[in-house]
Amino acid sequence: MIPRLGRIRMNILLITVGSSGDVYPFIGIGLALRRRSHRIFLAANAHFQRLILSVGLEFIPFGTSAEYDQILDNPDLWNKNRAFATVCQRGIIPLMRPGYEIVSDFHRTHGGVVAAHGIALGARLAQEIHGIPMATIHLAPVVFRSVYQTPKLPGVFLPQRTWPFLKRWVYALADRFLLDKLIDRPVNVLRGELRLMPVRRVIFDWWNSPQLVIGLFPPWYAPPQSDWPPQAFLTDFPLYDAPELQPMPPELCEFLAGGPPPVVLTPGSAMRHAAAIFATVVRTCRATGRRGLLLTHFSDQVPADLPPHVKYFPYAPLSQVLSHSALLVHHGGIGTTAAALAAGVPQVILPFAHDQLDNAARIQRLGVGRAISPARFHPALAGRLFDELTTDSVRDHCEKVAGRLHPHHGLDETCRLIESLAT
């Protein structure tokens, strides 16, 4: 049952762009803010309308379900050299004006404050024009540009020991020959329509609210650098996956209780092009006798002839599954990575694009998993990795790292930071 609000303290708009990995953290923040007696509006794609309404948040449609399905169907979304352009052209740019209008309307109607996903650029435009109190929220550290501890970017070979001046030069080239065309020009076209002066280096400085930037990850995962925005604060992984609304099926509970902890595979909620990975994990489980659990909404990726000790389910909350698992194989999205860290489960990460390569590199540095190119992932290598990562010493180290997470404190701190915008 959804608790009734007492006296409403503040109207707060949360606005996000993307898949479940981008939406669930905002739902978790929204629920935490609602418990603090605020009235919460969440703007997200219509694909998530039923979920958002079912938890008691007020929903604002921000893109259609058809648009959501269209971008997920595009294989370029998972190509490390074309993924960013695909997201820009199909997701970020078309939603700029609708995002601007949603935030502007909210400001006129409700006042209050806004917390926006970094790529919801229309929210940043509305803040600039109307002076709206707003926080920019970044889910993963890959978006924090630095010439010191540099994030691992798709298609860019930039060793950490590279001199800072060379890193600045690489960033300048990316700004001039990639980001200017993909982001800066469309942003400035809309700015011109709104009678604003042009801006440069949008995905470096301008996209961040000058008031507050929140990173939803802890400092031990990505230590803040001296060239990060001075208004940036880190909290912790939100770790919300709606377990109260999407409980585990009884058949899955029986499977988990009926034998040794399985290897779990999930390529992420938005991945429709991972049939080869599913086939490799199934073949490895068949050859080694390991139990396996396959999770994906898109059943056409799953081999038809599963052995008895490998089971498929469309969905299960990782917060409930991973405590009964031996190992997690996944794509490296920040939400899935954080879930495995919290559960103390070793990880095999097969990064494709976006933040995945950076998360994979951080997991390797922490000593809690291995990163392998999807193209190199075959049964012989998979078997060796599964053996290597399921030893007692690796599991003990993973559990020690899990003890460093404080998600409840992180959510409270995120709420406190958003609330501070009203003072």
Image: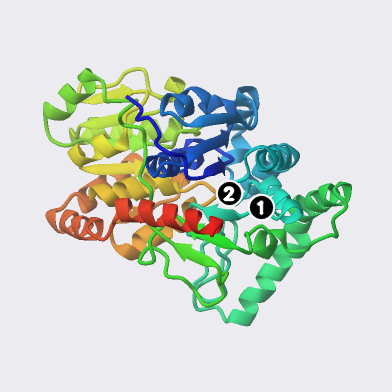
Up/down of 300 relative to 393, above or below: above
Mark 1 and mark 2 lie on one chain; the one further toward the N terminus is 2
Image mark for residue 113: 2
Say left or right for 272 vs 174.
left
Q: Nearer the viewer, residue 246 or 58?
A: 58
* Residue at the image point whose x is 55% and y is 29% from the top: 59
Location of residue 310 by image quarter = top left
Q: Secondary structure at mark 2?
A: strand
- How crowded is the residue under tag 2: few (<14 C-alpha within 10 Å), some, or many (20+)? many
Are circles 1 and 2 on residues that touch, CB within 8 Å?
A: yes
Residue holding disc 1: 132
Residue 59 visible in the shown view: yes
- Give the x, y percent position of residue 9: 47, 45
Position of 351 with respect to 246 (left or right) is right
The three-letter code of the residue at mark 2 reads: Val
Q: Is residue 332 visible?
A: no
